[in-house]
Image (spheres, grey):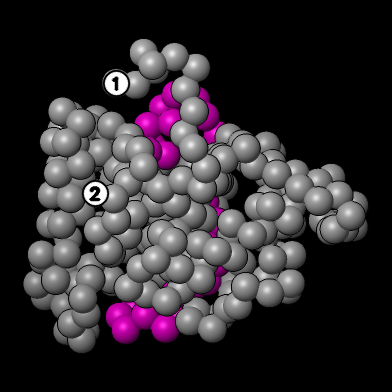
Amino acid sequence: MKLDILAIGAHPDDVELSCSGTIAKEIDKEKKVGILDLTRGELGTRGTPEIRDQEAKKAAQILGVSIRENLGFRDGFFMNDEKHQRAIITMLRKYKPEIVLCNAIDDRHIDHGKGSKLVSDSCFLSGLRKIETTYNGELQEAWRPKHVYHYIQWKTIEPDFVVDISNYIDKKIESVEAYESQFYDANSKEPSTPISSKNFLDSIKYRAADLGRIINVKHAEGFTVERYVAVDSIFDLI
């Protein structure tokens, strides 16, 4: 299956928290979108990997993505090396996305910055035909996505462009709340974490509202780029 967009996150819920409004919007435009999680989030303070697996499946159903896979890298300890790059290259060549969305280039969690660079490097290497990979016993063709965009996470980073998600904020919140083990629950007996507070859950909406305010819409998501954003006409800008 060829995808238009492959959204990649170091942990299950990275994509939902950061760019689920954007991918829900593109799915409504009949684009094929997939999610690739690098780890199962097994070092998370709350919940278990098995619970996260089920929550990720539920979130994928809410968003309506075409596929969701997990590479099973070690949470906290994966590296930007040939072994991990080849695993991602295999997925890139399998799904041939035009656009890849990936972790913030710098963030509070060390896996986010690591994941960002790992995915970005893998996208470049995937286009080199002398790097051979196989899938189901067949040699894969080289494939390089046209664009790699980095979504914004914990840290407030100035975006290079923003996407109007005003009509998709509710679906974004619904997909995040699929991760019941991770986020605010007044009745939970689990230890508190920086992302389990009510303020953090509320911040998903008010941060989107603030980005929306700046571009004169209700809600938006921001991204950074690796090269100039190009438009065919200045009228392409809203």
Q: Position of residue 122 (x, y in %)?
A: 67, 58
Local crowd size for mark 1, using a 10 Å CA cut-off: few (<14), some (14–19), many (≥20): few
**In terms of depth relative to the viewer, which is nearer, 50 or 193?**
193
**Residue 70 visible in the picture:** no
- Nearer the observer: mark 2 or 1; the answer is 1
Q: Which residue is mark 1?
A: 238
Q: Position of residue 185 (x, y in %)?
A: 15, 70
Give me the C-alpha separation between circle 2 and circle 1: 25 Å
Q: Residue flagged by tag 1: what amino acid is it?
A: Ile
Give the image quarter of residue 98: top right
Q: Quadrant of the N terminus?
A: top right
Q: Is residue 58 left or right of residue 39?
A: left
Q: Position of residue 42 (x, y in %)?
A: 45, 80
Q: Which residue is mark 2?
A: 173
Q: Which segment did they paint magenta?
A: 21-48
Q: Residue flagged by tag 2: what amino acid is it?
A: Ile
Placement of 35 over or under 196, stated as above or below: above
Q: Residue, x 33% and y 35% (percent of image)?
A: 163
Q: Position of residue 196 (x, y in %)?
A: 19, 72
Placement of 62 over or under 9, stated as above or below: above
What element does badge 1 sit on?
loop
Q: Residue, x 59% and y 59% (percent of image)?
A: 119
**In terms of depth relative to the viewer, which is nearer, 151 or 52?**
151
What element does badge 2 sit on?
helix
Q: Residue, x 24% and y 58% (percent of image)?
A: 156
